[in-house]
Image (cartoon, rainbow, N blue to C red):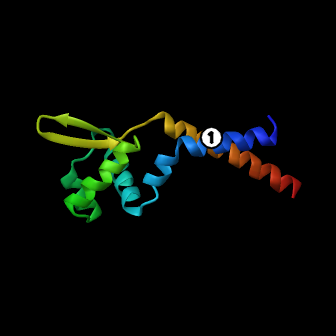
């Protein structure tokens, strides 16, 4: 694959995952993601996230909405309770492939530089 083709793949990867990068650009949303990952597969309720993040309930709900729209978080309903968890999606794989191409180009630049 030519360097130009690799650069085009990087561009496509960034375009496809732009919503994820925007969602993760906020440190409060990063903190929520980390908290959800620590909770594991069962997920967490808004009240638990409020305690862990020291954010208000409305703030946590707002950030969860953005993370849901970016397909980073899913909701599981159990009666009237809602549990939030990190949602594996194709976007994570696209980000990983894009990062691998960037890493390979950086290594090539270091060899040639």
Q: Position of residue 2 (x, y in %)?
A: 82, 38
Residue 7 occupies quadrant: top right
Q: Position of residue 97 (x, y in %)?
A: 62, 39
Q: Residue at x 25, y 47 (%)?
A: 44
Q: Position of residue 41 (x, y in %)?
A: 32, 38
Q: Residue furthest bottom?
A: 54
**In-image side of 65 versus 92 (left or right):** left
**In-image side of 15 versus 37 (left or right):** right
Q: Position of residue 54 (x, y in %)?
A: 26, 65
Question: Few, some or many C-alpha atoms within 10 Å of disc 1 (few <14, some 14-19, many ≥20)?
Answer: some
Q: Residue at x 11, y 39 (%)?
A: 80
Which quarter of the image is occupied by the N terminus?
Answer: top right
Q: What residue does disc 1 label?
A: 12
**In-image side of 109 versus 40 (left or right):** right
Q: Residue at x 54, y 36 (%)?
A: 93
77 or 43: nearer the viewer? 77
29 or 31: nearer the viewer? 29
20 or 85: nearer the viewer? 20
Which quarter of the image is occupied by the C terminus?
Answer: bottom right
**In-image side of 12 versus 40 (left or right):** right
Residue 87 occupies quadrant: top left
């Amino acid at each position: 694959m030519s360097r130009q083709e690799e650069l085009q793949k990087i561009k496509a990867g960034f375009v496809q995952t732009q919503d994820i990068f925007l969602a993760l650009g906020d440190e409060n949303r990063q903190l929520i993601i980390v908290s959800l990952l620590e909770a594991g597969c069962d997920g967490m309720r808004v009240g638990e996230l409020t305690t862990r993040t020291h954010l208000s309930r409305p703030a946590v709900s707002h950030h969860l909405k953005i993370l849901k729209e970016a397909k980073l978080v899913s909701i599981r309903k159990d009666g009237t309770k809602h549990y939030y968890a990190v949602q594996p999606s194709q976007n994570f794989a696209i980000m990983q492939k894009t990062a691998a191409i960037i890493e390979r180009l950086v290594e090539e630049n270091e060899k040639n530089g």
